[in-house]
Image (cartoon, grey):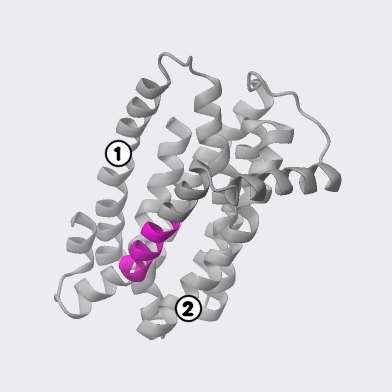
Amino acid sequence: MLAMILANIAAAMTGTLIPLYLTELGVGVGRVGLVFTLTSIVVFTLQIIGGWISDNIGRLRAIATGSVSGIFGFVAMLLAPTWQRMIIALAVYQIPFSLVGPSFGAFLAENSTEENRGKVYGLTGSIYQIVGLLGPPLGGFLAAAYGFKAILLVATIFYVLAVGLRIWMATTLRSPGISTSLLSMASFKSSLATLFGMMLGGGVITWIFITDGISDIAFRLSGELQPIYLQQVGGISLQQIGFL
């Protein structure tokens, strides 16, 4: 949880304000949507692979492996001179979500009993709200006082601390109930066939997939554009956006 909080404070510091940073680099509103569409393709492509890797090498190793690539993403964003380079940097930055996301929920399930699993998820979800309380206001303050590069620098420091914790866990602890195995194309094809069978089978997995997809589309229609709207139409400062 500490590693997740550190890593996602870094993400929350930058996530809300990245669209505004893109406009500062010369991107129009329409192209902001295009940038996030292109980077989302990375998650779409790698999420299934990330879950498969997690099943085979263990949750903690998958989390640590994905986190290391996130450092390259933060550094790339920090150094990117143009919005075209930012697309590449954001794509690299999305890689950890493909490995950490599927692994974290599975790790919680495997480290809790059936009787207490709901409480564990509720507690971790509550603790996780620290991210939303600290990340955006800190990002808004740094952006207003020192510029966008300062956000990326401080966020990188937070993220490196989280990666250090994750690497330590991956090298000293072992996920219960997971027997690691070698990655192979045959096992990936088998897992993929099972997954698509569940999604297209017409059962509860199918309807969860459909309803989540529709709600995500609704959110993404405006999600990345809200900070631009608040600044350009509402006249709200970067620091106020962070607090909001």
Residue beneath the point at 42% across and 52% down: 212
Vertically, is 155 above or below 1? below
Q: Earlier in the sequence, mark 1 or mark 2?
A: 2
- Residue at screen point 25% across, 64% down: 145
Which element carries disc 2, helix, strand or loop? helix
Q: Which residue is mark 2?
A: 34
Q: Residue sitting at 64 percent across and 55 percent down?
A: 46
**Mark 1 = which residue?**
129
Q: Which residues are magenta?
A: 213-224
Give the residue type that dot 1 points to. Gln
Kind of residue at badge 2:
Leu
- Point out residue 183 in the picture as x, y percentages from the top left corner: 81, 41
Residue 74 picture location, percent across and down = 52, 58
Mark 1 vs 2: CB contact within 8 A = no
- 30 over 227 or under it: above or below: below
- For mark 1, does the 10 Å Cα neighbourhood hold few (<14), some (14 to 19), or many (20 or more) residues? few
